[in-house]
Image (tube, grey):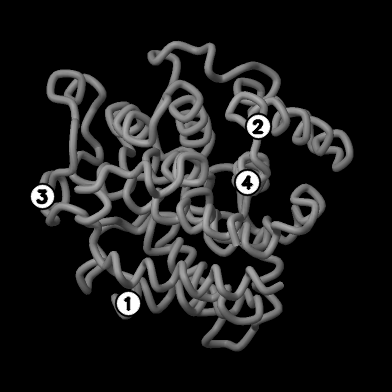
Amino acid sequence: MEKNKKIADGILGLAIGDAIGVPVEFKSREELDASPVIDIQGYGTHYQPPGTWSDDSSLTFCLAETLLEDFSLQKIANNFILWKSGLIWTPHGQVFDIGIQTTRSIDLLQKILNEKDFDSLKFLRYEADEYTNGNGSLMRILPLYYVLKDKSIEGEFNFIWEVSALTHGHIRSAISCLIYLLMIDELMNGREKQIAYQNTRERITKFFVIREIAEREVEIFDRIIKNDIQLLSRSEIQSSGYVIHSLEASFWCFLKCDTYKETILKAVNLGDDTDTTAAIVGGLAGVFYGSDAFPKNWYDGLSRLDDIKELCKKLEKKYSTI
């Protein structure tokens, strides 16, 4: 039960981080240095009330909800479509923030389901190019750990890739999801942050060799895998919507900070894709520090908190008995 509770804390931590970042999304680092985020706030960029989460959390909840039943790419795709239509897992009944690649991908999913060509969902990973490597699959991948927790995470790479490819099919996005889930796995097994990070680097390095990943792709991950990301200065960390930037920024913030609150504020105040950077690292920090570490006003102020808690409770119950 404890392991599942930690993943639930990660999901909540992700949503809270997302909500802290939403009001200042797209603000520059310079703007936030002049007027940093120090607490929960509202309105701002998207003119949403305090505690409002974005598509990052919505798609995370959509994935999580499908895991209450037998795993199915079709069910995940259908939930993504229902969300985009404003029918499920919106904070206030409407979609206000959605990435270009995610929009295109969900439109394609709609076409596939309409044509009942369900087998093609498994092959979306072969149709992507390197210009589709936004952070839209990394930001929602955390709940997949529920079905991977008793398996070799590396050994399930093709499975992870299929789930990533529903919106972001390139191998770079899938490897980013894998690295994130490996770090989650290390934290779930009680490792301290530095040991978890070192083990993750070693595991992914072996994976690169075993899977014969192209050297060009391997080199893209050098700053976080071959080298130690936390040794970089803040000016060297980017926080755009590119999946590599999001992965690096989230690990950097997590390793540099000592509390959940500090971690989220550091991520948000990097600027640019503030909600997603904070959501991704919020998952790591939520797992590591636990829900008791969440600032009470952030936790209590989260939109649809009871619904999120109920979803997490159902997931804990299902996966604690397997």
Dot 4: element: helix
Image-quadrant location for residue 97: bottom left
Dot 1: element: loop
* Disc 4 residue type (three-letter): Met
Q: Earlier in the sequence, mark 4 or mark 2?
A: 4
Q: Earlier in the sequence, mark 4 or mark 1?
A: 1
* Whether residue 87 is situated above or below residue 144 in the rendered picture: below
Real-space CA distance between mark 3 and mark 4, rounded to the nearest whole angstrom? 35 Å
- The N terminus, quarter of image: bottom right
Examine the rendering and report whether any part of residue 107 can be seen.
no
**CB within 8 Å, label 3 to label 1:** no
Label 4: how many Cα within 10 Å (few below 14, some 14–19, many 20+): many
Looking at the image, which residue is at 47% across and 38% down? 242
- The C terminus, quarter of image: bottom right
Residue tagged 4: 188
Circle on res. 85: 1
| Closer mark to the observer between disc 4 and disc 1 | 4
Residue tagged 2: 196
* Disc 3 residue type (three-letter): Tyr
Dot 3: element: loop
Q: Earlier in the sequence, mark 2 or mark 1?
A: 1
Looking at the image, which residue is at 26% across and 67% down? 304
Residue tagged 3: 43
